[in-house]
Each structure stands twice: as C-alpha cells, then as structure tokens.
Image (cartoon, coloured by chain):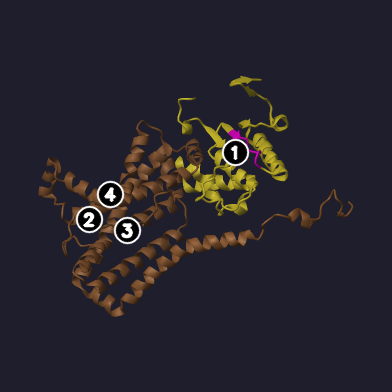
Chain colours: A yellow, B brown
Amino acid sequence: MTNLLPGQRGIGLVPQDGALFDHLTVRQHLEFALEVRGWAPERRESRSQELAEWLGLTLLMDRLPAGMSGGERQRVALGRALAFHPPVLCLDEPLSALDDQTRGEIVAVLTEIRNRTGITILHITHNRSEAERLADRILHLRDGRLES
Amino acid sequence: MSPPTDTPSSPSIDESRRGLDLGSDRRFLAALILLGGTYVILLLAMVVADLFYTTPGHLWHALGSPEIRYAIRLSLLSCTLTTLLSLWVAVPIGYLMARFEFPGRAILDALLDIPIVLPPLVIGLSLLILFQTAPLRALETVFPVTYAVPSVILAQFMVACAFAVRTLRTTFAQINPRQEQVAMTLGCNRAQAFWRVVLPAARPGILTAATLAWARALGEFGPILVFSGATRMKTEVLPTTVFLELSVGRLEAAVAVSLLMMGSAVVALLLVRTWGGTGLGGGTSLQHK
C-alpha cells in the first residue's frame, strides 16, 4: 500500500478542514473523481445527483465553497470522497471543528453512509466518546504502535 | 448582585483610571498620519508638478512624433512578450520552490534574488559580456540579439521575471498543499492535480505576477541602455525616450512621455489592486531605474 500512488489506493479521504477546492462548485466537487476517471457526463450527473440527494446538497449544487457552513463543507468533502465508490473511507477528525448541532448532523450522515454502503470507514479521532458512539472496532495508536 | 459601592476595598472608576493616558491614541494616530503623509504628499506633488509642467499640446506633440510612437509600440510589445516569458518560467520555478525540498535549494533561492538586489545596470553589463562568449556570438550571426530588439526583451525579462518568481512562489506557498493531496487521492497524478486544482487556485497570484512583471518591464532602463543601446527607431523604449529627450534639453517631451508612463503604471497597479492581494509577496516593489 505504501508504494502505491495515492490515486491507486482506493481510499476516499476527508481531511479535517475539508480542503475543498475554492474555484469549484459543489457539483464539480462531487464529479471531480469521476471526471478524472473519464466517466461520461450523463453518468457523472446521475452519480452527483444521487450523492447530493443523499447528503442534502441539492440546493447547493451551483455554490462555491466560500460562505458555506462547516457542516455543509464536510458534507461536500464526504460526497467528493464517496463519489468514485472507494472500498475504504478515511476520515481525519471530521467532527472536531464542528459545533454541537452540526456534529450531530454529520454523525447521522456518517451512520447512514455506513448503513447504506457497508464501506469500511477509518475514522481518526481524539475523542473517545465519539469513537465509542460510531465505531464497530476501536484501535488505539499509542507510541507509534497500534493496539486493539 | 449588590451595586458597587465606593468603599476603600472597591475604589471608584475615577481612581482606577488615575495615571492613565487614554487620550494618547489620538496623538499616536496623528503622528502616524503626519509621518506617512509627508511621503504621500511628496508623491502627489511630483505628479502634480509634472502635470502643470506639461500641456495637452506637449502631450499631443509627443504622441505625434514617429520616434515616440515607435517607442510606445516597442514598449507595449516588449513588455507583453516579457510578461508571457516571465510567467512561462516563473510558474514552474515558483511551484517547485514552494513545494519541494531538494539539495541546493538555498543556493537557488539566493540566485533567484540576484536580479532584484543587483543594480539593473550590472544585469545589462553581464548580458553584454555573456553575449561576447563564443557560443552566443555564433548565435548572433544568425539571430542578432545585442543592440537589437531581442536584447530589449531579454534585458526586461531578466529583471521582471525575478519579481514574477517571487510573487508566484508566495502564491503557491499560500495554497494549502492538502488540496493537491486530496486531488491525488481522488485519482489525479501530480500533473493533473496541478492543472485542475493548483493553477486555478493560483489565478489571482498569476494575474498579479503578470501585472507586476509588465509594469517592471515598462520601467526598465539601465540594462536596456547597456545591452541594447539607445538607438532611435530601433531599440528605443519609453524610458529611453525620456533619457534621450532629456539629454538634448527637450524637457517638455521628456515630461510628456513620463506622464504617459505614469498613467500606464497607475492603470497596471489599479489592476493589481482589483485582482486582490493574493500572492503579493516580498518582491513586489516597482522601482524604476
């Protein structure tokens, strides 16, 4: 895995701050990985619509990231990472920068993703209660060693 | 909660303020405005003095002169070409310097600043000497550079490009590398991540670099004088015109051409401001030499 290029690893990444592309609309974010893969426009459109409905982004499709709330940004980042059907989703502290209400909203979205897709989610967090609430299995990283 | 009482244990507001000099903020601001204002007034006074020295007739006469019209055309052409060449080189250098660690990076960093710190005259002299070497003299037999139009562009490019590099380096450094990393997890290779994510994000900085390179090239004089000469209707750009008109005592024409250049510089700077401060790094001064 280490020697593979990031694109070959099949991991959808959602960084802590979302790292959205400032010049792209929500629709272009959702279709980004599909365009890189050369999907036909109709297929891309249908996948982005599906994700938008699922993540509650239908009204934001033509918006740029500037001015979006923390929860909206995270949902766009999740949609962007899920679009190409990766077998693994890696979330780097996706809840840490959110207020309580938005956190609840994203937790619900994450639970739905898990239930709908059965995808393996590697959820990195410093918050024990968050881990206990969401995880099937908890691994501790301590002094550079992984403990279960 | 009981209202505050004026007892020895809780001193009055007046007492708590004793010894403070809260009115000094206004004096501090006044001092800042006074000190900074001197410079601004001097700048404005210079422009106003130029404006009063010349008349629309002088400007019209200057614009009617074939030599000055040639200089305007050559200035516009050479500055535009210089800008395109500068971006062509500064985008890759700026990106490499902002993103990659490699041996000799510090030396390269210092090298890239040479055109900024050296007197422009020295750049011209160094170019002249470079073109005296055997390989470049051989080149000049088929493609004349020294004392010809290409030398004007090369002299402008050597200086303007350094400013574009500095601006773009700051621009790329300010773009979160995580965006590229995410693009790569989404299936992009590094080149695709650059074209699809980094370059569009750098657009305001690229426009700023282009405007600065253009304005810097317009004001370039020292290296052009040494490397290209000051031949009328051949290697004469607008700063050369000012120099030539001044040297024969035609002060009105020199001032008229100076005003033309000032106008162009103001337009260029306003464009930079319009495009925002993104990517404005340390190398953004536009000193005319």
Q: Are marks 2 and 3 on the same chain?
A: yes
Q: What element does badge 2 sit on?
A: helix
* Residue hosting label 1: A16
Which region is colored magenta?
A90-97
Q: Is residue B207 left or right of residue A128?
A: left
Q: What element does badge 4 sit on?
A: helix
Q: Is residue A58 left or right of residue B161?
A: right
Between marks 2 and 3, how big is the CA–CA gap?
13 Å
In this rendering, the label closer to the viewer, 4 or 1: 4
Q: Work out whether B285 lies above or below A38.
A: below
In this rendering, the label closer to the viewer, 4 or 2: 2
Task: Say if the magenta span includes residue A96.
Answer: yes
Tell me, yes or no, if residue B88 can be seen here: no
* Residue hosting label 4: B158
Task: Say if the magenta span includes residue B163.
Answer: no
Q: Is residue A132 left or right of residue B1?
A: left
